[in-house]
Amino acid sequence: MEKKARVSTGLPWYAYGIIDFLGIFLSLGPGIVAWSIALTYLHSIWTFSAAKFFLYSLLAPFLLIFSFIFVLWALRLFIPKQKRGVYPMGINKGTLTWFCHLGLSRSSIIAGISPLLNAFYLTKYLHWRALGMKIAYGVNTSIGVSFVDLSMITIGKGSTVSEGVHIACHTFVGDRLFVSPVEIGENVFIGMNCILGPKTKIGAGAWVGMGNLISENITEGSKLDNFKWEHGNPERSAK
């Protein structure tokens, strides 16, 4: 007998309230604290002369960025580590842990400082490390990359992640949440607009062309042409 796909029946009303509370606290909290520190600092030097105010105000962006990163790091210490697995949607440790990490990862976008953080090697490295991502310093990434479930992502040194690349370590199957790491080795090139899903593992020295959708293993040193791979099918461009 053919098995039917599991269909989501939705969550009880109170579950959405708990999820929203966690999302609001973790998504808004770091930005509110960081902006408050930066604005309070600017207010404290408001009475300075024009020249001194301009000089001292140059420190405000650094206060904003590094206080934001510190708050992220501090909050993550109180959240359980994400683990691979399949979890029922609802109020349980697996899904709540995922929602907490997701909330923190959205905070830079909500705070309006994501492009600023991603513009410099030091700030994006510290930001992603604060969220638990295992990434080497000096990895080349565009401002326009999108990483979800950062504590489950590994990117080796010398790698390049191009504009529009989206990496996520989770997916939903009916009323189940599936979480699994994404691992990118050293000296890997990921072309523009690629999507990497859970369980993806790309070996060292691999070259992945633009527009590929990957949820499988790419062997070390291999080359994947542009628009070549979708849902495990390496020949879609020939169709």
Image: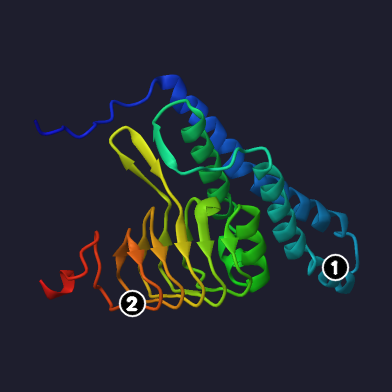
The residue that appears at 46% across and 34% down in the rendered structure is 95
Determine the secondary structure under disc 1.
Answer: helix
Residue 179 percent coordinates (x, y): 42, 45
Please, what is the three-letter code of the amino acid marked with disc 1? Tyr
Q: Which of marks 1 and 2 is in front?
A: 2
Label 2 Cα crowd, 10 Å radius (few <14 / some 14-19 / many 20+): many
Residue 43 percent coordinates (x, y): 82, 54
Residue nearer the viewer, 28 or 2: 2
Quadrant where the C terminus lies?
bottom left
Left of 118 or right of it: where is 215? Answer: left
Left of 140 or right of it: where is 1? Answer: left
Exactly how many numbered labels are in the figure?
Answer: 2
Please, what is the three-letter code of the amino acid marked with disc 2? Gly
Quarter of the image for residue 224 reads bottom left
Residue 41 percent coordinates (x, y): 82, 55
The residue that appears at 28% across and 35% down in the rendered structure is 174
Residue 175 lies, with reference to residue 224, above or below; the image says: above
Q: Residue 56 carries which label?
A: 1
Label 1 Cα crowd, 10 Å radius (few <14 / some 14-19 / many 20+): some
Residue nearer the viewer, 45 or 213: 213
Q: Which mark is residue 209?
A: 2
The earlier-in-sequence mark between 1 and 2 is 1
The residue that appears at 33% across and 75% down in the rendered structure is 210
Quarter of the image for residue 29 reads top right
